Image (cartoon, helix red, strand yellow):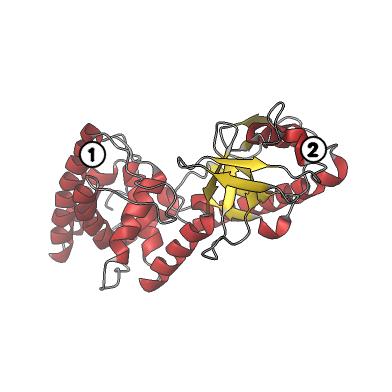
Amino acid sequence: MAITVITAFDEFKANYVNLGQAVTASARSSRNWLDSQIQSFPGRITDFPLLCSDYDVYFGSFDRKTKKRPLDDIDMIVALHAEESTYYEQYDGKIEMTVSDSSTKLKKYCHDYTNKINSRKIINKFVSALSSVPQYTKAEINRSQVAAILNLSTYAWAFDIVPAFFTKPDSQGKTFYIIPDGNGHWMKTDPRIDKARVVTTNQKHDGNVLNAIRLVKYWNRRPTMPSMGSYLLENMILDYYDRQYEKASQFVDLEFISLMGHISTAVYSSVYDPKGIQGDLNKLTYDEMKKISDRAVLDYGRGVEAWNYESNKYQEYAIRKWAEIFGRDFPTYG
C-alpha cells in the first residue's frame, strides 16, 4: 500500500519490475562459476574445440540491465579459437566457415564430406560437455537454434551459451562475432554495440532510461494486447531517447506517459538494428501494430489523467488510475 504516487511506483518497481539485488548477485555468481567450467573443457573433454577466452562476452538484457522480472535467461558468448579458419559471407547474410588444413580440432565439426564448420555440431559438443559436469548431472541440457541451453533446477533462470568466432578487422576496421544461424551455418552479430548504446543513452539522460525501459517491458507483457519482442521494444525506446534534447525525468511515471505517446505511432514504423546487421526489427503484422497502438493510446490517456489527479493532490485517484494500466500488482492506496 502507498499514500503517494512516488511511493507507489517505488514499491511497484522494487517488488514487480526490477530484479532484486540478491537475485542479480546470485545470477552473476552462478554465471561466473559456469564460465570457469567451460574454460576447463578443452583440457579435459576429448576433442573439445580450443577456446579464446579474451573475446568471451556476456550479452542480452540481463547484461544490459534492461531485464525486468522475472529473470528467466542469461546469455553468454563463448569464443572459439578459429585455428586460422576463414569465413565467407553470402548475399543473404549466411556465413560459411572454412577450416584450415592445419586445423586439428575444428575438422571434426564439419558438415559431412566438406571442410565447412557445422554450427550444430559445435553446439552439440557444448551440450555433451555440460552434461559431464557433476553439478549439472540433474540439469536439463539441450540445444536451441543458436545456443546450448543449461536449465538448472536450483535456479529460476536458464543459461543460453552461444559459441562464436571473433573476426579480424575488416577493410573498415570493424570486428564481429560469428554465431550459429540455426541452420548449421553462421551469421554476424556484435552485442558490444547494443550494450554501448544502452550505456551511452542512459548516461545522456542521467541514468533515468533503464527504469523506463523495464517499466514499459512490464507493460508490454501484460495480457491486454499482443506483445512485442523485448529487443524490438528496447530499441524503439532507445530511438526515442536518442532524439530527445531534454533529459529524461527521474519520475518514471512521466517517462511512461511520454513513451506511450511515442509507441502509439512508432509501432507502425521501421525500427532498425543498431548493429546494421538485421535490418528492420519490426516484423509485427498490421493487426498487431494496431492493437498495440490502441492500447498505448488508451494508457497514454490514463497516464495523463493520473498525472492531473496527482498535480491536484488527489493521490488516491491517481494511484487507482495507474492501477488501471498496470493491473493488480500495482499498490493500492492506504
Query: Is 242 placed above or below 221 here?
Result: below
Q: Residue furthest top?
A: 112
| Image position of 36 (left or right of 223) | right
Q: Nearer the viewer, residue 128 or 305?
A: 128
Q: Position of residue 180 (x, y in %)?
A: 58, 39
Q: Quadrant of residue 58?
A: bottom right
Q: Position of residue 154 (x, y in %)?
A: 66, 38
Q: Position of residue 173 (x, y in %)?
A: 55, 65
Q: Nearer the viewer, residue 104 or 210?
A: 104
Residue shown at the point (43%, 63%) measured from the top left: 197
Query: Is 311 placed above or below 1 here?
Result: below
Q: Quadrant of residue 185?
A: top right
Name the amino acid, label 2. Val
Residue shown at the point (71%, 35%) measured from the top left: 115
Cα gap from disc 2 to disc 1, whole angstroms: 45 Å
* Numbered disc 2: secondary structure: loop
Q: Residues within 10 Å of mark 1 (few under 14, many from 20)?
A: many
- In front of the other: label 2 or label 1? 1
Residue shown at the point (14%, 50%) measured from the top left: 301
Mark before the other along the chain sequence, 2 or 1: 2
Please give the residue where the numbered disc 1 appears in the rendered image. 289
Whether residues under marks 2 and 1 lie with C-beta atoms below 8 angstroms apart, the answer is no
Q: Residues within 10 Å of mark 2 (few under 14, many from 20)?
A: some
* Numbered disc 1: secondary structure: helix
Residue 201 visible here: yes
Please give the residue where the numbered disc 2 appears in the rendered image. 133
